[in-house]
Amino acid sequence: MGSRYMYIGMVALASQQYLAIAFIYSAIPVILRGNGASLELVGLYSTVFFAFTVNFLWAPVVDRWSLNRLGLRRSWILLTQVATTAVLAAMAFLNPKTDFVAIFLVSLALATVAATQRIATLGYIAEALDSSQRSLGAALLGWGRVIGHVIGGAVCLPIDRDCRLAPGFAGFSSAAGRFCWMGVCNS
């Protein structure tokens, strides 16, 4: 049986990656539309998910090469946590009324980071759990996904309305990244 911290880490990792996905999929289009973007631009915005379509191109790199002495999966998870925090911090300072192209490019970067984190997380869970624990792992990933979708899609809209994202969302991402890392390090 795995440690409680490992299970918490799995939920947190899934929450973090799906937080980014839901933020891109649910919150950003509403924010753009609310700031005067046309329906055509909002529709074009959905192409940021192309990163999930082609992530098989870099999956072999994530599955084979470790970035540092933390190990294969943990090194990629750490990189994606840092990158998620950096990308969200950059996005927090963009103006949705005037910076559509920049928001699109930053969102594409965030989707690419989330797709890469998903590769590393699924590999980590496959290696960390034996076959008798994988159903529990799948359930934990499902719960993490739900938590990430709720926070990324619903909670981020009031944060944007009330504080323009900068302190709230970038700070949350940093805290979630530390929480995720705690679970991975204690497995």
Image (cartoon, rainbow, N blue to C red):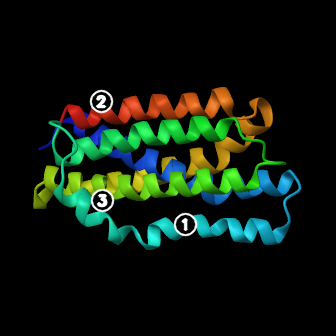
Q: Nearer the viewer, mark 2 or mark 1?
A: 1
Mark 1 = which residue? 49
Residue 5 in which image quadrant: top left
Residue at the spot x=63%, y=51% of the render? 153
Element carrying mark 3: helix
**Residue 27 visible to the viewer:** no
Element carrying mark 2: helix
- Mark carried by residue 138: 3
**Residue 66 visible to the viewer:** yes
Amino acid type, residue under disc 1 in the picture: Phe
Mark 2 = which residue? 182
Mark nearer the N terminus (3 vs 1): 1
In this view, the residue in front, 75 or 99, is 99
Give the vertical position of 105 relative to 71 (above or below).
below
Mark 1 is surrounded, within 10 Å at the Cα level, by few (under 14), some (14 to 19) or many (20 or more) other residues, namely some
Amino acid type, residue under disc 2 in the picture: Met
Judged left or right of residue 135, residue 86 is right
Mark 3 is surrounded, within 10 Å at the Cα level, by few (under 14), some (14 to 19) or many (20 or more) other residues, namely some
Mark nearer the N terminus (3 vs 2): 3
Residue at the spot x=34%, y=71% of the render? 56
Residue 149 image position (x, y, % from top left): 55, 52
Amino acid type, residue under disc 3 in the picture: Ala
